[in-house]
Amino acid sequence: FFKTVHSSSPTLWGSCSNYQIRSSTSPTDASVWSGLTNVGSSYYKITDLITSAGLPYIMKEDMPYYLDSTGAVKNDLAPELSSLICANSGKGAMVWLNKIYIPAGSQSLLEYDVADDVSTWRSPSDLATTLSKFNGRISALAADDKYLYIVMDGTNVAQVLTARLESIGGSVQWVVHPITEVPISGCETAFVSSIVQKRLYLSSIDHEEPVYYIPLFSG
């Protein structure tokens, strides 16, 4: 994995093994890459790299880690996720509206508010306890100016949901809307692009399957 951290000196971070990362402010010059930084246990694999507020965040199978301003490795963001250890925990994590969204375990989604240092469970399965099609693993996340898009794996189909805070009857609530099903073996990644037309794109874990897209409203 690679991720550019935009700070006073933009820095490219990359993972080198299950648990090691290194960085460079001039990545095309092999001689100026940093030494290795160990992140957590070698037993649990890195599943993604993201950035927020000028710091790198390292998602692993057991829990998320980050480097503070001194470069020290910290594991206090959401240590409770260690109870949901999974090969896909942290995969597809993203930042939206200054909050980090972290898929975890077999069906969970954690929201971490960077500014307020507050964690909130946003798992769609908590809102659909009797609807099995909405209790699957969150395989991908995407976002635009209005919504967080949640792609949830089923059996040869993916459920595509939108989520955000909405005011209902004067009360602000986290609301999830199912918008469509996509016949896909499993979703590897999702993203929103406005090239040609504003669309939500989904790619499969199977390279022989097509890339799907869903037209989105431009406003």
Image: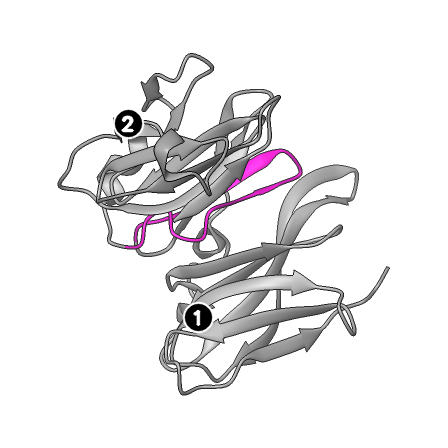
Q: Which mark is residue 171?
A: none
Q: Amino acid at mark 1?
A: Cys
- Quadrant of residue 135 within the rendered picture: bottom left
Q: Which mark is residue 187?
A: 1
Helix, strand or loop at mark 2? loop
Between residue 123 and residue 58, name the one nearer to us: 58
**Which span of residues is magenta-colored?**
88-105
34 shown above or below 122 = above
Q: Residue 211 appears at what percent x and percent y?
A: 54, 80
Q: Residue placed farthest to the top in the image?
A: 70
Q: Which residue is mark 2?
A: 35
Q: Is residue 110 visible?
A: no
Q: Residue 201 appears at what percent x and percent y?
A: 60, 71
Q: Amino acid at mark 2?
A: Gly
Which of label 2 and label 1 is nearer to you?
Answer: 2
Q: Does residue 104 belong to the magenta stretch? A: yes
* 139 left or right of 80 in image: right
Q: Locate the C terminus and report the quarter of the image it occupies.
A: bottom right
Residue at 34 percent of width and 33 percent of height:
22
- Quadrant of residue 174 within the rendered picture: top right
Q: Does residue 190 belong to the magenta stretch? A: no
Between residue 89 and residue 42, name the one nearer to us: 42
